[in-house]
Image (spheres, rainbow, N blue to C red):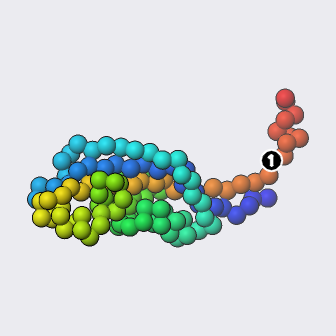
Amino acid sequence: MMDDATYEVNGWLKFVEEDSWENGCDGKGTSFQGSDRFHAPSVSELLEQLQDFVYEGSMEIDPCEGEIGRVDFFRMEGASGEVLTSAEETAWRNGEGKAWYAVYTFYVEKVTREPVDLEKETSNV
């Protein structure tokens, strides 16, 4: 008997690069990864959890051909790695501060679980 499916994310990737207001990103990015796990009974609830985790930013579903289940969130960050404050954004736009363009990537999986017949599965052990 199959249990209901859940939707899960096991970890995330973050790519960040400095962004100049006048010249765009510098092309010298840095990658990070995290081991946070998320799960929900529906895709929409899972996406809400991911949005809450990233806190702010735009979302793109399946942004790359051939990577089904991928969702990216994009946001601007200050030196601390937190969302750019309005004061930091103003300074950045005036050429008096720095900002970083961050992309958070998650891979969503649909997971179904069912009990294992241990007697059958261990008959050769």
- The image quadrant that residue 59 belongs to is bottom left
Tell me the quadrant of the picture where the N terminus can be found. bottom right
- The image quadrant that residue 81 belongs to is bottom left
From the viewer's side, name the closer residue of 50 and 44: 50
Q: Is residue 118 visible?
A: yes
Q: Is residue 60 left or right of residue 50?
A: left
26 vs 124: above or below:
below
Task: Name the residue at 71% across, 54% down.
Answer: 113
Q: Which residue is mark 1?
A: 116
Task: Name the residue at 70% across, 64% down.
Answer: 4
From the viewer's side, name the closer residue of 11 and 90: 90
Residue 63: percent from the left, percent from the top?
A: 36, 58
Task: Name the residue at 42% across, 59% down.
Answer: 71
Tell me the quadrant of the picture where the C terminus can be found. top right
Q: Is residue 18 left or right of residue 125?
A: left
Q: Is residue 47 visible?
A: no
Residue 118: percent from the left, percent from the top?
A: 85, 42
Q: Is residue 91 left or right of residue 7?
A: left
Residue 42: percent from the left, percent from the top?
A: 59, 68
| Amino acid type of the residue tagged 1 in the rendering | Val
In the rendered picture of this protein, how many numbered marks are placed on residues? 1
Q: Residues within 10 Å of mark 1 (few under 14, many from 20)?
A: few
